[in-house]
Image (cartoon, rainbow, N blue to C red):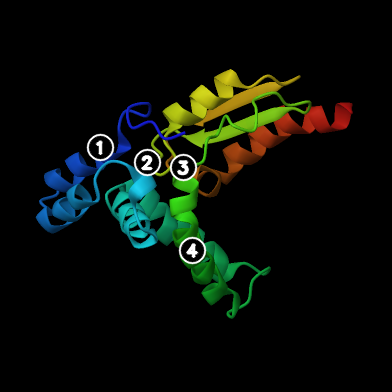
Amino acid sequence: MYDAGRDGSPYKDLLERLRAAGRSKQVAAVEAMGPDPRVWSAEQHALYHRFVMATNPESFAALKSVVLPSLWFSPLHSLPDLPAFFQGMKLSARIFPDTAVFDDWADGTRFEVPFFLFQGAHDLVTPPGRARRFFDDVEAPVKHFELVGDAAHFAAYTHPDRFLATLVDRVRPQLTAA
């Protein structure tokens, strides 16, 4: 369920970052969209997320220096796979309007399996406050919330050693105990 005030207003935070950067045209575009993502078009969602990424130096740097190079240099990908990545991003942009009205709690918060959530503390795409509230409402036999303090949206990419250590220390014991 959409709740404009529950996440410390990512919309207002974006406007403040755009104003601080002197980007008046982008401020006008975001203000014209309004704060309710349920009424945005797919193009507006894509624009909003592009502005979020562009005004979050950690996420933008991670995209350029970690995510894209990992696709380029990975032995698991070939050159023709790169356009597929961007096609996937375009698909995501088209489905944003449907996900804006998604209620994270609607399908329930009780799980019969271990539940783990890894979150970048500076993530402006998926704000950690909302992720933490959902985690706190979850009932599971085992659960763990990992807030990566010096990471943004791509925490697993920018801190792969810490991510792997958490998987080994927290997740693996739950899998081998079964």
**Tag 1: residue type?**
Asp
Label 2 near label 1: C-beta < 8 Å?
Answer: yes
Which of the two discs, 2 and 3, labels the residue nearer the N terminus? 3
Categorize mark 2 by other alpha carbons within 10 Å: few (<14), some (14-19), many (20+). many
In the rendered image, which residue does mark 1 sit on?
13
**Tag 4: residue type?**
Met
Helix, strand or loop for disc 1: helix
Q: Distance between the residues labelled 2 and 3?
A: 18 Å
In the rendered image, which residue does mark 3 sit on?
101
Residue 163, image quadrant: top right
Categorize mark 4 by other alpha carbons within 10 Å: few (<14), some (14-19), many (20+). few
Classify 141 as above or below 50.
Answer: above
Which of the two discs, 1 and 2, labels the residue nearer the N terminus? 1
Q: Distance between the residues labelled 2 and 4?
A: 17 Å
Question: On the rendered structure, is 42 left or right of 168?
Answer: left
Question: On the rendered structure, is 8 left or right of 94?
Answer: left
